[in-house]
């Protein structure tokens, strides 16, 4: 029988001891970026900065009104340029420097705050706000912080360029790499994610129900966030509080 999770204020828990060779998978969500001042994905009315998600976050919306979509993401690019990493970003960057390849940092966020904090390797499963890609050809996404408020940018192939983010109805990036890292981890930590959005929400369920083929053991699962997540039953511990206050003391390297 799987025991019930322990849920309580984050400061009531002891730091997580990480021994040499421990493989750690960290998934971050909107709650981490929100502490830096980036607005969360959408409010209770289903609006995203006063726009319906269908208008600005779907392939259909882009085909219907690409200028509206580009203005929306151009505003977000300006916003991202004005914010700074918070202590949670810096704590994960430090963890990455200490663990090296034993840390797999995956984020649902499209902002560059993990990189600005110094994280050496970050997989953005929903793409990156400051990148652009072509609708028509196989040109890889490329770094592009520019705002397009009036013009519609085009690729050398003649195709329309679009923001390099993953929209509703599209496959998240790096799922094979994410799946391999999840299957082999010893510690799975979710920070600032509601547990409601798939496929990210299904990662902890996989960890909870499948022992690692590398060790034969189940990974420890820990949640850090302001509120109890919808999938709290999938975690061994739910440490409640701000990520920026809890992450600097969350891990203890042995």
Image: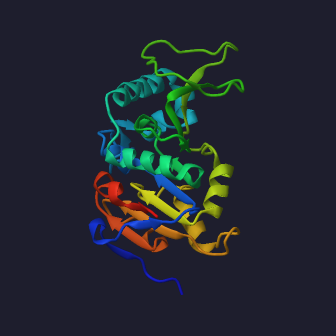
Q: Quadrant of the N terminus?
A: bottom right
Residue at x-position 51% and y-position 23%: 66
Residue at x-position 36% and y-position 24%: 78
**How many numbered marks appear?**
0
Q: In the picture provided, is 81 more to the left or to the right than 55? A: left
Asked if one can make out residue 46 in the rendered structure from this viewpoint, the answer is no
Residue at x-position 32% and y-position 51%: 44
Q: Position of residue 239 (x, y in %)?
A: 35, 66
Q: How is the image coloured?
A: rainbow
Q: Residue furthest bottom?
A: 1
Q: In the picture provided, is 17 more to the left or to the right than 181? A: left
Q: Position of residue 15 (x, y in %)?
A: 37, 66
| Front-most of residues 230 and 113 | 113
204 is higher (above) or lower (below) than 172 = below
| Front-most of residues 214 and 190 | 214
| Front-most of residues 34 and 88 | 88
Q: Position of residue 102 (x, y in %)?
A: 58, 55
Q: In the picture provided, is 83 more to the left or to the right than 217? A: left
Q: Position of residue 150 (x, y in %)?
A: 44, 13
| Front-most of residues 117 and 100 | 100
Residue at x-position 36% and y-position 43%: 33
The image quadrant that residue 154 belongs to is top right
Asked if one can make out residue 114 in the rendered structure from this viewpoint, the answer is yes
């Amino acid at each position: 029988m799987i025991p019930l999770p322990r849920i309580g204020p984050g400061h009531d828990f002891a730091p997580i001891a990480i021994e040499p060779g421990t493989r750690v998978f960290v998934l971050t969500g909107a709650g981490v970026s929100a502490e830096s001042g980036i607005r969360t994905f959408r409010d209770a009315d289903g609006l995203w900065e006063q726009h319906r998600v269908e208008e600005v976050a779907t392939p259909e919306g882009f085909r219907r009104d690409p200028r509206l979509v580009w203005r929306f993401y151009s505003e977000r690019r300006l916003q991202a340029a004005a914010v700074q990493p918070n202590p949670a970003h810096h704590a994960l960057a430090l963890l990455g420097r200490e663990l090296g390849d034993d840390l797999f940092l995956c984020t649902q966020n499209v902002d560059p705050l993990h990189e600005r904090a110094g994280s050496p390797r970050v997989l953005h499963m929903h793409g990156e706000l400051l990148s652009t890609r072509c609708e028509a050809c196989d040109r890889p996404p490329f770094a592009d912080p520019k705002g397009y408020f009036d013009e519609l940018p085009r690729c050398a192939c003649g195709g329309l360029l679009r923001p390099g983010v993953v929209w509703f109805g599209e496959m998240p990036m790096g799922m094979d790499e994410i799946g391999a890292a999840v299957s082999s981890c010893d510690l799975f930590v979710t920070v600032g994610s509601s547990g409601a959005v798939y496929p990210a929400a299904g990662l902890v369920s996989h960890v909870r129900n499948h022992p690692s083929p590398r060790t034969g053991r189940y990974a420890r699962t820990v949640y850090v966030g302001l509120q109890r997540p919808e999938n709290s039953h999938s975690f061994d511990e739910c440490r409640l509080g701000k990520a920026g206050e809890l992450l600097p003391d969350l891990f203890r390297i042995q």
